[in-house]
Image (cartoon, grey):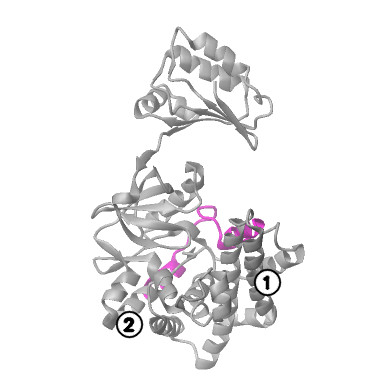
Amino acid sequence: METKFEQGRLTVILPEEINPKNHTAIEKELFALEHLDAAGELVLDAENMNYISTLGLRMILKFRKSHGGIPVNIINTSEDIYNIFETTGFTAFFNVKKKLRFVDTSGFELIGSGMYGSVYRINDEQVLKVFYGIQSEEEIEPVINTIRCAFVHELPTTIPFEIVRTEKGIGTVLELLDSETLSRVIEKDPQNLDMYIDKMLALSKTLARTAFKEGELRSRKEMLKAKLGRSAPFLSAEELGTIETYIDAVPDRATAVHGDFHAKNLMISNGKLMLIDMDEFSTGHPLWDVANLYCIYQGMVHLDKKIAYGMFDLPSNSLYDDFYFKIVGCTLPQAEVIWDKFFNGYFADSSREDKEKILKLVAFYGNIKFITFLVDVCATLKDQPEKLAEKVKYIRYFLTESEKENLHVLLKYLDLWK
């Protein structure tokens, strides 16, 4: 019986059949597996299985009972095998998961891509979001649950249908009705840019008013600090502590934060905006979303070009304008307009002097967005020390820029947030 033992998880590949003739031999082999006593989690992989008898079911129950307290998961079941487990009540005691359907993306239109994944149009009613760096169903389930939670709270987001496998990694099929990304709509209809910015502004205000119960979603601060945990090998304890201090300084709120709010992560359907790319969706102060917008439409626009080319691995002969348009979906002049109109609309009731103070606070946390983005990048470069060292250099650049500001003074400007 083929097995795999990694990080305390023992995975057992079940045979094609467990029937009255072979169940005794299989049981003997199962209970004698290497690493069984050291395992903290047991996984029974049923990808090859096409039949299981009642004796096989009893054997699995016996196996579970003999290792009481250790989670036993059954994965990759066919529809028929899953129905057997469900009918016999196994799904009440085991975490049973069906085999993921395989979807080939090569025939689909790519309609958007970002830092965390790509979106393909399947048909007029469904899209496929493929996540970068995610290779298991367990990794993607929190994102799916987050989308469902947002939908139940009547936020305009797509309905997730199923998790699938693709040649590019794990993805999810989502509802989408005759929609385009807002960035593409702006590209086609630039004369109505002001109207689209107003829609973005209205949706951001809706997020800031939508409250969740404790425990429904992860907090933005928790998510950011979890990211920082991945940076332990390449940042000092003092540097990590400083960044955590900046994150902790933002007041807690139970209201919605998208986490990567900008025109390329919004779809427009029948004139209404819908949220996509919900990987970072959480709860927290609206400062996080406004600072992200600043990072996208001001921070990246005015970034020193030497730093920009190094951060994003751009060839020296490339045009930054073209890169920016590809990543963000608008031109540099449009970015200036989007930020100016959004910010002044968001703080329409504030005086000019107060806006200047709030802008300093927002810009500071825009730098923190750059830092957490680079931490994500660095976490993928552990086997490329030269590239890793280059990216860490930029983390330290933004950290140094942040340390020039007086955080105590900046935090007072939160009182001006209306």
Q: Is residue 156 visible?
A: no
Inspect the image, locate mark 2, and give the three-letter code of the amino acid beneath it: Asp
Q: Secondary structure at mark 1?
A: helix
Residue with the most extreme bottom position: 352
Q: Is residue 6 above or below residue 80?
A: below
Residue under numbered circle 1 = 396
Magenta residues, start to end: 202-230
Rendered location of residue 218, percent (x, y): 54, 56
Going by the numbered disc 1, the residue's amino acid type is: Arg
Residue at x-position 66% and y-position 59%: 385
Residue 201, image x, y percentages: 39, 76
Mark 2 lies on residue: 194
Quick one: which residue is furthest to the top in this view?
A: 21
**Reading the chain from its start, which is encountered first: label 2 or label 1?**
2
Residue 114: image location, x then y, percent:
44, 63
Q: Residue at x 69, y 82 (%)?
A: 404
Instruction: Kindly report the secondary structure that dominates the magenta region of the rendered protein.
Output: helix
Instruction: Kindly indicate the quadrant of the structure image that contains residue 204.
Output: bottom left
